[in-house]
Amino acid sequence: MPFRHVAIIGLGLLGGSIGLAVQQALPGTQTSGFDLDPASRARARDRGLVGSVAETAAAAVAGADLVIFCVPVGAMAAAAASVAGALAPGALVSDVGSSKLTVARALAEALPGAAIIPAHPVAGTENSGPDAGFASLFRQRWCIITPPADASLAQLTALSQFWEALGANVEVMTAEHHDLVLAVTSHLPHLIAYTIVGTASDLEAVTRSEVIKYSAGGFRDFTRIAASDPTMWRDVFLSNRDAVLDMLQRFTEDLTELQKAIRKGDGETLFEHFTRTRAIRRSIIAEGQDDARPNFGRGEQAEA
Amino acid sequence: MPFRHVAIIGLGLLGGSIGLAVQQALPGTQTSGFDLDPASRARARDRGLVGSVAETAAAAVAGADLVIFCVPVGAMAAAAASVAGALAPGALVSDVGSSKLTVARALAEALPGAAIIPAHPVAGTENSGPDAGFASLFRQRWCIITPPADASLAQLTALSQFWEALGANVEVMTAEHHDLVLAVTSHLPHLIAYTIVGTASDLEAVTRSEVIKYSAGGFRDFTRIAASDPTMWRDVFLSNRDAVLDMLQRFTEDLTELQKAIRKGDGETLFEHFTRTRAIRRSIIAEGQDDARPNFGRGEQAEA
């Protein structure tokens, strides 16, 4: 057990899942937590997301040797500032934010002198809030840890062991590289999904009811991630701006190429492109990162 | 039972599913079929996709009062030509193609004088071929029928009853409107998914292994439909070119607007856009067109 007492600031999908997972996987570890929203604190108490829900962030972190910030990346600075002076000596500070360069900077500025090792478990659902968390969220998912150059090896090891105890695989990389990788595997897909769902709901010639009825043709797949928490995602795009804009530029170039092929009736280019994208899906399934069953194994209502 | 003998030309995901569904839902109806690929014919016999698998398309349609073409839309003309002269008098000709204007034209040209009512069941999976079909594919999905202006009402009613017997809901509209609706609910999503998966596999700074590992951040959702049959999709884009290019233009404009908001740090525009896209997901679930469980109810491997 690498830590005796874990404090969680922010008790939404990620924070709640960590609290439940720690209680299940590390029963000897104390857990405490705080959420800025009183209704979320009440719900966290009801669900037992952590051992004790405090009334202030400072009270939640008192005595903790690991403090994890689980708030939207744009709220990290304020959340960290709210515990300044209350951290136990030697406590390790971490987070779960989807962008790491700006978060690392925000935490370091708000908590000068504290030991900080940012992290990002690549796991989630489209749901958010204190009702969304569950203990198995991190199983067989990857957690990326982005230690600063002067991080303590002992604390890095402890944090890795902590995430492994929760069922995750751990990878260590720089914050810069993390932000580039996540821009393509997570941020760009969310931006695209939000865009196409918006485009579909703004049409005049096609009604919203038609979009919904015939969504099984492919569109419904995009609506899932476009139902994700708007605050969280607004913050992600603002904080990882450069990498997202870079990936978006590449995506737009590729889309323009396919658009040109459609306009010109160039079936060969289309066929060639559509053929090579199959291999990635096969690899994702082989690596246990998705369900192999058709349609993600959706339980269609009619068969229930 | 609206038809006594249904012939299916093309025994892939759609054709095979229709064959299995007819045998299950309409046991008194005879089924026959043909596939241009000898291996698919052999597999169709093994799986019993239809009552009898013929060695030619002409033999398969002999005596049938409903003939359904289940081939890629670019292959409709040749498939229809291969049964010209072999259709029983009064037989109704239909299809399952994802674009309807060009298919209606191709069928009418290849089979002058035949009764033709095109249709499109909006159902499928990312798999293809004679092993992919299953009897419940059409349950609680929509089947769009696009009758020409001179279609017989009796035959339109019979075709509607046929699809309802297979578990589908039926909607009737013009081929023009179908092509516009499907451009946004199916064709554009596939084009976008194929594009982003291609973009991700072409990066230099991010390895393919990283793309796969961290795909649970959102990317994996896109890889499912980007694993769909390349021939089928090449044909769809070529045959529904104008509607696809129109929808793509609107999508690109919307994407440019969000890109600008990210570049300018305009969080309000992003937040507002991300908030209104949630409602569509809720409606799709309420209408039984998707699984309400988080992550599509994926059975994560770790929990198996």
Image (spheres, coloured by chain):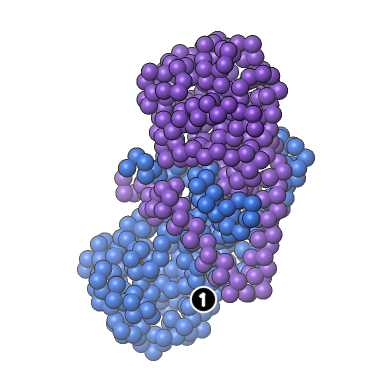
Chain colours: A purple, B blue
Which chain does the residue under circle 1 lie in? B
Residue B2's x, y, as percent? Answer: 30, 68
Mark 1: amino acid: Gly
Extreme residue toward the bottom, this view: B85
Answer few, some or many: residues within 10 Å of disc 1's Cα (few below 14, many 20 plus, some between 14 and 19). many
Residue B129's x, y, as percent? Answer: 38, 68
Q: Nearer the viewer, residue B206 or B2?
A: B206
Along the horizontal axis of the image, is B26 left or right of A118? left
Residue occupying image coordinates x 68% and y 33%? A102
Along the horizontal axis of the image, is A89 left or right of A32? right
Along the horizontal axis of the image, is B10 left or right of A232? left
Vertical position of residue B158 compared to residue A164: above or below: below
Residue A90's x, y, as percent? Answer: 57, 16
Extreme residue toward the right, this view: B264
Q: Which residue is mark 1?
A: B74
Tell me the quadrant of the picture where the C terminus of chain B can be found.
Answer: top left
Tell me the quadrant of the picture where the N terminus of chain B can be found.
Answer: bottom left
Res. B90 visible in picture: no
Residue occupying image coordinates x 63% and y 74%? A265
Residue occupying image coordinates x 38% and y 18%? A28
Quarter occupied by residue B22:
bottom left
